[in-house]
Amino acid sequence: MQIQDLLARYRQGERYFAHVDLSGASLTGVNLQDIDLTGANLTGANLSWSFLNRAQLSGAVLRQADLRHVTLASGKLNQAILSGANLTKADLRLADLQEADLNWAVLQEADLSTANLQGAKLDQSNLERAKLNNSQLMGAELMEANLQRASLISANLTAASLREANLDSANLRGAILIRTNLTEANLSGVCLRSANLSEADLHRIVLSGADLSEAILNGADMSRANLAGAYLLKASLRKAYLLRTNLQDVLLLRADLSEANLRGADLQRADLSGAYLSETILSEADLGGAYLLESHLIRTNLDRAQMTGCCIQRWHVEDVDLSRVECSYVFTEFDYATKSPTERYPGNGDLKPGELAGQNSEDSSTILIDWKEVPNWEALTYTITHIEQEEAQLSLTIKSFDSQSERYRLQLMASHVVNVQKLRDRLLTLYPQMLQRCQAKRREILKLLDIPQRQDEKQQATEVAEQKKQQEQQKRRQQIYQEVVHQIEAILMSQAPERFVESVQRLLIYLHRQGFSTEEIQQKVISTAIAKRAKRDPFFTEQLLRWEKTAPEAARFSSVGSAVRLAIALMWQN
């Protein structure tokens, strides 16, 4: 059919042009809304800038067609052949592309929001910076596809194939990736916050610096993957496979790793504070310098695990064999102000083989408790009495109390063999509560015992209460500061310079209004995060240089902008 004939008939109201041959036709900029081109041959046709809203193109052949800037919103393209087509900046919102062939197609910056791509073929397609929010990609094929910086918020990729795909800095927040194949995919800097990756195949992927906070990874296979520096706060990894996985410097705070297999994994300096490690396999894993603050280790397999330098403050160990752990020393306390472990154990020298197991042995009647300062003996006595009342036939006796290198050691003797770790944890948990009660009820206790009260005790009690209030306020302020610093680091590791300068500036203003000094953040946190990201992401370096040349003067000379420019200067100097 001749082009002029088609356009004339369309102007007269005709819409049905199924199976016509328009190969190589030039239809750029035309308005063909609601047209029916079912099964039409549009190979190599030029439809750029055309308006094809609600067009029927089911089964149409658009191989190598020029569809740049085309408007195909709500179009029907199911089973259409678009291999090699150029759809740069095309509008495909709500389009039906089920089982469409888009192999090698160019979809840069295309808008496919809420589109149906179920079963579509997108192997080696270019979707850089494309919008696929809320799109349906179940069973889609995206092998070696380029999804760099693409937005797939809440997209459904169940059982899709993304093998060797490039998802660098893509946004998959809340996406569904159940049983998705992501083998050897690049997910550096990707946002997978709250995403569902249950049973996904993620082995050998690159997830360094990615945000997987609150993500669901139950049963996922991440063997030999690289997750160095990733964020997995509150993530669920039940029964996940992480054999030989690189988890250096990963944040796994309060993550659930129950029954997960981390055999031979590299967890050096990983933060597992508050994590659940029930029946987790950590045999041969490297936990050197890891943080296990208040972590729960229940029937955890630590056979031949490396644990030298771990911080085990208030960790919970139950039915765990520590006799075959390789460990020279551990830290038993953590200083939140300096963000560093303290109280090396043993104080001098190294642990002997199996000595760590002895330190955490549950089969004993001797309980050793270390204190940073002399305890309040009244509160301690009532604490011991309270514990004795909780268990029938239990009697506790104080055997000794002495000073040992900047700490005090209390030795208790139980009337029978007890679970030492549980009893110690119970005493240390109950003591502060009992101390508070004793101080609050001291006058009543003395009156009941007919003991006269000193005149200065009322004033002393008031001072203690005021001091405690100030400490709580200081602690809360410190928590606020730490939370904001973490937010700043996350923003710097994920957003482009033109965005993070404004975002971080707002946070600095907030801290300043709260009375915090932001000098350390401007001098260290910003430059460190930028240097870390630039080291692994060459494109980010280009973004920084472009920002420095094009940024508004207000942004460049703001406190954050100045810190960024200083970081750039230091990078060039290095």
Image (cartoon, rainbow, N blue to C red):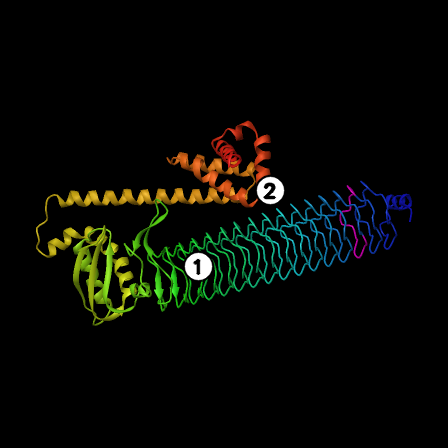
Q: Is residue 266 above or below residue 457?
A: below
Left or right position of 189 against 340: right
Give the residue at x 57% y 29%.
552
Provide the secondary structure element on which disc 2 rests. Answer: helix
Q: Residues within 10 Å of mark 1 (few under 14, many from 20)?
A: many
Mark 2–mark 1 distance (CA, rounded to whole Å): 32 Å
Q: Could you tell me which residue is drawn at 23 percent across and 52 percent down?
A: 407
Label 1: state its secondary structure: loop
Residue 84's x, y, as percent?
Answer: 76, 51
Left or right of 184 on screen, residue 30: right
Identify the residue shown where x is 30% and y is 45%: 472
Q: State if disc 1 and disc 2 touch (CB < 8 Å).
A: no
Judge the density around disc 2: few (<14), some (14-19), many (≥20) Cα neighbours within 10 Å. few
Q: Amino acid at mark 2?
A: Phe
User: Which residues are drawn in magenta?
Assistant: 48-61
| Residue 387 in the image, given as x and y percentages of width and height | 23, 64
- According to the image, label 2 marks what residue? 539
Q: Which residue is mark 1?
A: 286
Q: Earlier in the sequence, mark 2 or mark 1?
A: 1
- Please count the marks in the image: 2
Residue 40 location, quadrant: bottom right
